[in-house]
Amino acid sequence: MTRSYHSPRRAQDAAGTRRDILRSAVELFSAKGYARVTVADIAKQAGVAPQTVYSSAGSKSEILHQIFDEAIARSDSASTTNRIRETEDLATALTLLAKGTRAGNEAEQQVVEVLYAALPVHEDGAVMWEKSTTEYRNALKDVAEHLRDKGLLHQDVEQATDVLWFCFGFGAWRTLVKECGWSWDDAERWLAQQAVTIFTH
């Protein structure tokens, strides 16, 4: 009888190869656009053979799904919403929300660019957008519910969630930082101020 052999070093090497492939794919997708990148391009960037890309991370489409899944897993919305639940006033809550959403968007700015580039051309574009935004919007809804519970909302929770998405969603940060060239610090301050103004009028 033979026993299966498990090599921790081999598993570690395989995980490292996969990380290199995903990192290379993110860099290429964000720089050139999803549609213009091939598996061969990813392989060259990662320093591996194309077949290694397929065996380690899958097809280009599968790689894209993994990139988004890992970005979602890295998000730390719970810590932000937990801090906000301890607040008693609107300005503090929205300032913390600006800081938390800024951190996530800044850390994952390459992945956000990949998402925008892939949406029009990927067969699962709508599915990926929903997957990428659902947890984000749920966290904003938690904030809206907290503001309601504290008597700080003039809108219902659903409308308030939409307003928070308008102020702090992917599009707000991307417009100010990428398209308008604002610093992340300036964008954070301004978005917090605008949100406070909206919710107090």
Image: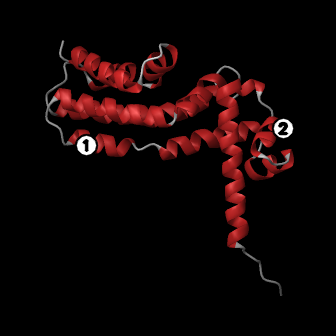
Left or right side of 175 for 50? right
Task: Tell me which label, 2 or 1, sits earlier in the chain.
Answer: 2
Disc 2 residue type (three-letter): Ala
Indicate the secondary structure of the residue bearing disc 1: helix
Instruction: State the quadrant of the N terminus.
Output: bottom right
Q: In this view, does 188 lie to the left or right of 15?
A: left
* Residue 115 falls left or right of residue 166: right
Residue at the image point whose x is 70% and y is 65% from the top: 11
- Front label number (2 vs 1): 2
On the question of residue 103 being in view, the answer is yes
139 and 98: which one is in front? 98
Instruction: Kindly identify which residue carries mark 1.
Output: 83
Q: Which of 36 and 126 is in front in this view?
A: 36
Where the C terminus falls, by quadrant? Answer: top left
- Residue type marked 1: Arg
Left or right: 5 as drawn, with respect to 141: right
The residue that appears at 43% across and 18% down in the rendered structure is 182
Residue drawn where x is 48% and y is 37% of the image:
107
Q: How crowded is mark 1: few (under 14 residues within 10 Å), some or many (20 or more)?
A: few
- Is residue 159 visible in the rendered image? The answer is no
Front one among 102 and 181: 181
- Label 2 Cα crowd, 10 Å radius (few <14 / some 14-19 / many 20+): some
Q: Distance between the residues labelled 2 and 1?
A: 45 Å
Q: Residue 100's mark?
A: none
Q: Is residue 33 shown above or below 53?
A: above
According to the picture, the residue beneath numbered tag 2 turns out to be 40
Residue 164 percent location from the top left of the image? 34, 23
* Percent coordinates x, y for residue 18 in the rendering: 70, 51
- Observer-nearest residue: 135 or 72? 72
Residue at 59% from the left image edge and 23% from the top image edge: 116
Whether pointer 2 and pointer 1 mark residues with C-beta atoms closer than 8 Å, the reply is no
